[in-house]
Amino acid sequence: MISLLQQFSISFTNGFLPDYAPLLNLPKDFQIWEEVARQLSPLIHARAVRKVLENMPLLQIDSLQTLAELERAMLLLSCFGHAFIFCPPEEKKYLPASVAVPWVAVSEKLGRPPIVTHASLIAHNWRKIDPKGPMTSDNLATLMLLNGGVDEAWFYLLTMEIEARGAVAIPHILAAQTAIEQDDKPAVADALQHILTTIVAITDLLKRMREYCDPYIFYHRVRPFLSSFENIDYQGVKKQNMRSYNGGSAAQSVLIQVLDVALGIQHKERSSSQFLLRMRQYMPPKQAAFITYVEKNIHIPNFCLKNSSLTPLYKECVAALHAFRQEHLKIVAEYIFAHVEKVGTGHVGTGGTHPMIFLKQLRNDTEVE
């Protein structure tokens, strides 16, 4: 099992988060990036970030060799890019070459687009306060913030904890398939129970979003910086300098898509299914490939629905995922649409969809046929 997970760059303990602690600093040739990163939020508040980034030298990334270095560079450049485009009072439609050229180069090496993604802002944006402690929000700190503040930090940290806690389900999904192939019903039931417990646990974590992330602050100060790029000029990029990408979205979480396909959830609306497929392009390629592997090789629904002793437990797992999506809907309603009604605009989510319609479709699809 471990070798299979390694094949898809999945950690046995951390799931879709890296096994290693993300780098705190790049090599000395990139210290100008680190200096800008350390003062990014104050630069945004002072409305000085664009001038600093435009005057920043254009660095070549050839000396960045390790995955950890590339991920650190991707995190910094993603934050620089979104800070430049979305810094108030008005959005810009271009990125200076000092950001655009290295960002595109790093993104090509990592196999995902030059835009803020779940893989950068969540999976590679943490450090443990106690290095020997757990991957929980009370032992994690962010490496990068955009506008800054406890609300933005909590939004990222709680999402990280959900990813870390959800990692428990991954080996049990694979164990369930092994037991199915051996017709070992008690082992299938044991795996399903662990999957159920995990889904309930991440739903309970999601409910904690309100503890330190205020809906008003999220809507007006966090959300705008995570938005999509539409016809942005990546200056200095020789091939395809005009680019559009979807912004940050929970649909970019490999964990949630894996739970979906493992439990056999079919998304009937073409727009929803196509959006989920498109979001796989924003994931680390090997991890995205794991979703396809699970789709083709895990047969939990068929086996459980043909065995009456397993059917109730399987249905509980699907119901738990339905409850997770219902909680996500409540948060979107509270954190986005309550404010849309007041200001009258902004109905499109950071990922580029109408979030209420999209999430209702996903929730309604999360049921047993």
Image (cartoon, rainbow, N blue to C red):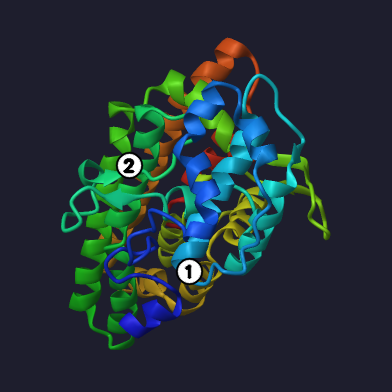
- Badge 1, how many Cα within 10 Å: few under 14, some, many 20+? few
**Residue under the point 80% across and 52% down:** 236
Q: Position of residue 217 (x, y in %)?
A: 44, 21
Between 360 and 58, the one lying in front of the other is 58
Picture layout, residue 4 above or below residue 345? below
**Residue under the point 37% across and 50% down:** 321
Q: Is residue 254 left or right of residue 317?
A: right
**Figure label count:** 2
Q: Position of residue 79 (x, y in %)?
A: 55, 42
**Real-space CA distance between mark 1 and mark 2, rounded to the nearest whole angstrom:** 24 Å
Between 273 and 126, the one lying in front of the other is 126
Label drawn at residue 158: 2
Q: Is residue 360 left or right of residue 142?
A: right
- Label 1: which secondary element: helix
Q: Amino acid at mark 1?
A: Leu
Between 327 and 279, the one lying in front of the other is 279
**Residue under the point 83% across and 60% down:** 239
Label drawn at residue 229: none
Instruction: Please state, as top left, top right, bottom left or bottom right, where the N terminus lies in the image.
Output: bottom left
Q: Is residue 228 visible?
A: no
**Residue farthest to the bottom, as pictured:** 182
**Residue under the point 48% across and 30% down:** 41
Residue topped by disc 1: 67
Question: Of label 1 and label 2, which has the lower sequence position?
Answer: 1
Q: Position of residue 268 (x, y in %)?
A: 60, 53
- Label 2: which secondary element: helix
Q: Is residue 74 left or right of residue 197?
A: right
- Of badges 1 and 2, the one in the foreground is 1
Picture layout, residue 220 above or below residue 313? above
Q: Amino acid at mark 2?
A: Leu
Q: Position of residue 303 (x, y in %)?
A: 36, 75
- Badge 2, how many Cα within 10 Å: few under 14, some, many 20+? many
